[in-house]
Amino acid sequence: MPSFNQIRQMLAEAGFRLSVQEEDVVCIELSLEQGTRHQAIFLSELEDDDGRPYLRVSTAVSPTTGLDARRALVFNWQSRVGYLAIGDLDGVPYLQLCENRPFEGLDAAEVHRLVLEIGGLGDRMERALSADGDLL
């Protein structure tokens, strides 16, 4: 089972641009569509009630102002990967696309796939919710 520091190292070795590296948080600046769009992906370590470590991969999608909660809940029901939640970004409540995975069984390929999947889906959702804008 990898540690959070090993996951951070996997990301750096895979060539991801790490813009924030704190003890329990890493931010990747993901470049999409030949560099015309960008998405910030945050990775952090969580623990469940039994103390088992989990990796959370998340990205900000949209400010919650004017958010249609029904659409968000329908997405959560239909989604096979990722769920929507609300989290603060610089003191502003944002809709966040998240995915949690137990560290047990994680390898570099799975972490890489999660980053790209949450980043790409988050960017498409951001575009749909912000009239083609790029919030981050």
Image (cartoon, grey):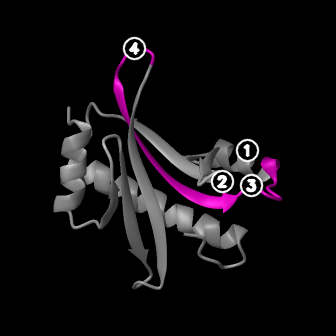
Marks 2 and 3, the one that precedes in the sequence = 3
In space, the residues marked 1 and 2 are separated at their CA atoms by 15 Å
The residue carrying mark 1 is 73
Q: Is residue 98 left or right of residue 26?
A: right
Q: Which mark is residue 64?
A: 3
Q: Which mark is residue 94?
A: 2
Name the residue rendered at 79%, 48% in the picture: 69
Residue 60, magenta (yes or no): yes
Q: Position of residue 105 (x, y in %)?
A: 25, 35
Q: Position of residue 134 (x, y in %)?
A: 59, 75
Residue span colored magenta: 49-70
Secondary structure beneath dot 1 equals: helix
In space, the residues marked 4 and 2 are separated at their CA atoms by 29 Å
Q: Nearer the viewer, mark 3 or mark 1?
A: 3
Name the residue rendered at 46%, 63% in the picture: 40
The residue carrying mark 4 is 50
